[in-house]
Image (cartoon, rainbow, N blue to C red):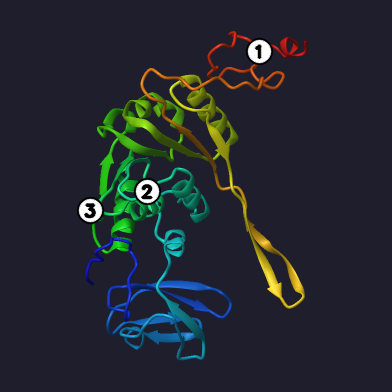
Amino acid sequence: MSSQPTWSGVRRGPLQPGEWIRLTDTKGRRHNIQLVEGKQFFTNRGSIDHDSLIGRPEGFSITSSAGGEYLVFRPLLNEFVVSMPRQAAVVYPKDAAQIVAMADVFPGARVVEAGVGSGALTCYLLRAVGPAGLVSSYERRQEFADQAVANVDQYFDGRHPAWKLTVGDLVESLDDEDVDRVILDMLAPWECVDRVADVLTPGGLVCAYVATTTQLGKTVETLRAHGGFTEPQPWESLVRDWHVEGLAVRPGHKMIGHTGFLVTARRMAPGETAPAKKRRPAPGAYGVDYSGPRPSGLPPQLAEEEFDA
């Protein structure tokens, strides 16, 4: 297969040997297969010859030897990332879309990503920055990096020219400068805030993706206490499908609920600090039981009774 000039991962024209396709049956069950001349795909509804698929434009239905009907399309990126082999959990499409949009990842951007996991978010970032940008990924574990390389190279049909992968700890290995965006998909993103501040260009943005409320709280408070970022913005997104058949229009029985929290903050210029929040903390927010980072101006211990006046 020839490389795509845009490095989008999207392929057009007739299906070719070596390409990956998605077969979907009448019950919505999906099978991803790589087309190989002379090979057959077997299901509980019989077999399908790969040769009967190769050379046809995508978007058709085919019947297996035992009468099963299947739709044939190339997989979309959101379909590819949830079905690709993985060593680590992937960033789900709903969160990847939020990251690309809310972190304002643009063509030509210089982006640092840590960690790379199985490469799902990397694919979205590479598509967003294009061949003129840079996605510099850092991953501590070699087996995760190896899986990411296999998945990303498979999707783009080769090594994307904007991708640089480093196996190592972000704080110790980071050698990028004047970075536009930093995406932290890792266990303890608060440990990287000082180093991230060093490389982010003024006006640049950091985005952290964390799984638990404990991680969320520590990440937000560390960014807030640093002083060199705007007030952190935390949120999550929930996706619910709908059932629509005639007059039966209702929410679906399944939804993609909590997958992770997102936090964004922008880098201030060197020596500048953002104005302090005017809203007073909730009673007990920084009480005697709180042991995390404290915003500047707060006393070491702020008990509930101090807010009651």
Question: Dot 1: few (<14), some (14–19), or many (≥20) neighbours within 10 Å?
Answer: few
What residue is shown with label 1?
Answer: 288
Please name the residue that numbered disc 3 is placed on: 161
Q: Pick the quarter of the image with the N terminus.
A: bottom left
**Above or below, comparing residue 160 to residue 45 in the picture:** above
Query: Mark 1 or 2 closer to N-term?
Result: 2
Q: Residue at x 54, y 17 (%)?
A: 295
Picture quarter containing residue 302?
A: top right
Residue depth check, mark 3 versus mark 1: number of the one nearer the observer: 3
Query: In the image, what residue type sits under mark 2?
Result: Phe
Residue 19 position within the rendered picture, expressed as x and y whole percent measured from the top left = 31, 73
The answer to whether 44 appears left or right of 16 in the picture is right
Which residue sits at x=51%, y=86%? 69
Which mark is in front, 2 or 3?
2
Q: Nearer the viewer, residue 74 or 69?
A: 74
- Front one among 113 and 140: 113
- Closest to the observer, 154 or 128: 128
Classify 84 as above or below 288: below
Marks 1 and 2 close (CB-CB < 8 Å): no
Disc 1 secondary structure class:
loop
Left or right: 223, with 236 as reference point: left
Marks 3 and 1, how far apart in space? 52 Å
Total marks shown come to 3
The x, y position of residue 170, in whole percent, is 33, 33
Give coordinates of residue 61: x percent, y percent.
Answer: 47, 86
Label 2 sits on residue: 106
